[in-house]
Amino acid sequence: MSTPISKKAHRANNAATGIIYGLTGATLLLLAAIFLYVFYKAFHGFEWKLLSFTPEGIGNQFFNTIYMVFLALLFSVPLGVGAGIYMAEYAGVNKLTKAIRIAIETLSSLPSIVVGLFGYLVFILYVGASWNMISGALALAIINLPLLTTVTEDAFRALPDHYRSGSLALGATRWQTITRVLLPTAASRMITGVVLAAGRCFGEAAALLYTAGMSTDLNWSNWDLSSPTCPLNPIRPSETLALKIWSSRTESLATNAASLADVSSAALLLLVLIFGFLARYLAHRLDRLKDI
């Protein structure tokens, strides 16, 4: 026979479970509504020429977005992972460590427009360069560093201590323990940080306004890396999909500006989804290999 206290606890449990399911369902419905709205708008104004690599299409912006994210991760992942490993495995509890943590927290809360302005002052004006992809990638790397550092540190700290002690007891050095035991084990968790960092890079516009520029003049038959129209030249201005959405909705005089913005939004959303699924698949594969 149940007591009044157990009945009250049971009702409270059911109520809390219902609230959790309700909030989860509301979140899923909101996401579904956003997806449906974006793709409906894109389908409503879709024309095949919008996917071309011409000034009338978004093909160049699509490529620039992928290339920009690749360059940003190329800069930020080694630095973020290295900083996270240092904070988790080497840094002691002292004033220097506290100062570094405060700096990381401050950097993570900076508005992206401020980072963009810093990138413009340092990477453009101080260096004496024009708008280019490297400057944009460096600005995005600064934005991503706190996230990658924190995720890496948390992934290493979550590992059981017997991983370290067991490896050291077998004669491995501290660096061998980190690179051959801890890093492969924490890799799947660290991929989550990379996915979040890449997602922010895909959608970033404010920082790139000051650093990457808005040009999309590409010649796909020109593979001279010193040419400003070469697609693979990182020292050239580049307009990404996020910038295309902003420019199409705010300052474009083209008759199909709204359609360009809608199709760009759908393409950007698909790009983020595909990257996220691929990264999750890679993390799943790493977990399976780790268990073998």
Image (tube, rainbow, N blue to C red):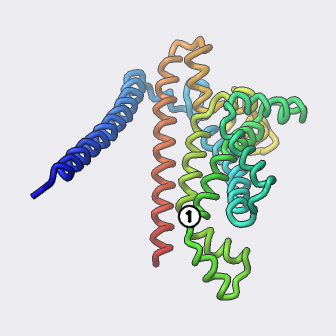
Q: In this view, does 280 lie to the left or right of 159?
A: left
In the image, residue 213 sits, relative to residue 151, either above or below, namely: above
What residue is rendered at 90% in x and 32% in y?
Answer: 126
Camera-nearest residue between 224 and 59: 59
| Extreme residue in the front direction | 4
Q: Is residue 54 left or right of residue 45?
A: right
Residue 30 place in picture, x, y as percent = 36, 32
Residue 112 place in picture, x, y as percent = 67, 32
The residue tagged 1 is: 158
> Which SS class for mark 1?
loop
What residue is rendered at 61% in x and 40% in y?
Answer: 201
Residue 241 place in picture, x, y as percent = 58, 32
What residue is rendered at 73% in x and 37% in y?
Answer: 136
Which quadrant of the figure has residue 166? bottom right
Quarter of the rendering occupied by the N terminus: bottom left
How crowded pointer 1 is (Cα within 10 Å; few <14, some 14-19, many 20+) is rated as: few
Camera-nearest residue between 158 and 242: 158
